[in-house]
């Protein structure tokens, strides 16, 4: 296996609440395109990263990991790649939603559960998210609020600003609201149970599907213990699924990967270079690089840049 920092070609997604920033500011998709999400590291049938440059240019991540499973890490079982990393531009409010845990997901679908974290890349003045419920409500209280159209009155609205981090375990009701751009690090899952979508219509005039029964089942399963995660210093979120560090680079930051885990380096602001084994790999705002497990030491250098580094 030839080890080097591998730039990822993103997978873009159009959803009705998306905006123009991912194309205009981050070079995703095509100029002028309205995009909701840019999947920066993904190994799924519904979105697959492709390696750009070097010996493995044009190879999909699935092909690469099938050939070199040790590039993921020595604890990987070789089945499902564990993470999905995105940039998300919310020009309008996302639906009020919830995600299942692994047990519920695997007993009802073929996917995993979804615990995630949000790093607020940018936010308009006054921006907020829905971050859980105001208090502990019964299943019937939530069901009645959905039926009567008053669900929003039960939500906890959290003001947000650039640079903050929010941890969203499975079972926690949440929504990104308008005027926010985030980096999302999550389990490799695409299960969303929509609870409420403001009765808005899709381009064909139809209402988006809701998943009320599943959502109520999942919300009931919330365990307060799952809300705990580690943070402090460079670590902005850490749980059993991922560890995420943020570096505001003004100079050079030395990093490394060992045999345990790959690293994903996502540049959310500024530009710079990744240096490895005497070679420099240019990194612009929005670029995403995979550093294989076992690569050893590498560094990120910039006059001014912010990078989010994710490992298992």
Image (cartoon, helix red, strand yellow):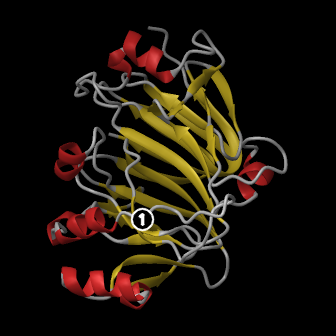
- Residue 177 visible in this rendered orientation of the protein: yes
Q: Is residue 144 left or right of residue 33?
A: left
Q: Nearer the viewer, residue 249 or 224?
A: 224
**Residue identified by numbered label 1:** 210
Residue most extreme to the front: 205
Dot 1: few (<14), some (14–19), or many (≥20) neighbours within 10 Å?
some
- Among the 4 quarters of the image, the one containing residue 235: bottom left
Residue most extreme to the right: 31
Q: Nearer the viewer, residue 75 or 245?
A: 75
Residue 72 against residue 249 in the figure, above or below? above
The image position of residue 168, as x and y in percent, is 35, 64
- Residue 227 visible in this rendered orientation of the protein: no
Residue 79 against residue 236 in the figure, above or below? above
Residue at 63% over, 55% down: 36
Q: Is residue 139 left or right of residue 264?
A: left
Quadrant location of the N terminus in the rendered image:
top left
- Among the 4 quarters of the image, the one containing residue 220: bottom left
Callout 1: SS: loop
Residue at 62% over, 36% down: 10
The image position of residue 116, as x and y in percent, is 37, 56
The image position of residue 269, as x and y in percent, is 67, 54
Q: Is residue 68 left or right of residue 61?
A: left
- Say how many tags the image has: 1
Q: Is residue 301 left or right of residue 292?
A: right
Quadrant location of the C terminus in the rendered image:
top left
Q: Nearer the viewer, residue 129 or 193?
A: 193
The image position of residue 5, as x and y in percent, is 55, 25
Residue at 56% over, 33% down: 289
């Amino acid at each position: 296996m030839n080890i080097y920092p591998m730039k990822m070609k993103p997978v873009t997604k159009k959803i009705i609440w998306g905006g123009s920033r991912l194309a205009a500011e981050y070079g995703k998709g095509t100029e002028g395109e309205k995009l909701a999400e840019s999947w920066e590291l993904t190994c799924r049938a519904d979105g697959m990263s492709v390696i750009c440059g070097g010996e493995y240019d044009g190879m999909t991540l699935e092909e690469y990991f099938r050939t070199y499973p040790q590039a993921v890490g020595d604890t990987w079982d070789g089945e499902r790649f564990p993470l999905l990393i995105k940039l998300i531009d919310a020009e309008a409010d996302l639906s009020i939603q919830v995600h299942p845990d692994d047990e519920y997901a695997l007993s009802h679908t073929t996917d995993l559960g979804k615990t995630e974290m949000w790093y607020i890349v940018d936010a308009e003045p006054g921006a907020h998210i829905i971050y859980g419920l105001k208090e502990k409500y019964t299943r019937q209280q939530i069901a009645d609020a959905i039926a009567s159209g008053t669900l929003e009155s039960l939500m906890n609205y959290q003001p947000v600003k650039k640079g903050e981090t929010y941890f969203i375990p499975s079972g926690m009701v949440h929504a990104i609201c308008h005027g926010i751009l985030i980096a999302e690090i999550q389990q490799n899952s695409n299960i969303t149970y929509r609870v409420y979508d403001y009765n808005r219509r899709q381009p064909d005039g139809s209402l988006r599907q809701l998943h009320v029964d599943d959502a109520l089942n999942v919300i009931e399963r919330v365990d307060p213990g799952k809300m705990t995660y580690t943070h402090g210093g460079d670590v902005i979120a850490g749980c059993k699924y991922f560890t995420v560090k943020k570096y505001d680079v003004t100079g050079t930051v030395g990093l490394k990967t060992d045999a345990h885990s790959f690293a994903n380096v996502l540049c959310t602001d500024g530009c710079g270079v990744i240096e490895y084994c005497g070679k420099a790999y240019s990194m612009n705002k929005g670029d995403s690089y995979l550093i294989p497990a076992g690569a050893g030491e590498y560094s990120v250098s910039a006059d001014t840049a912010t990078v989010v580094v994710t490992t298992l």
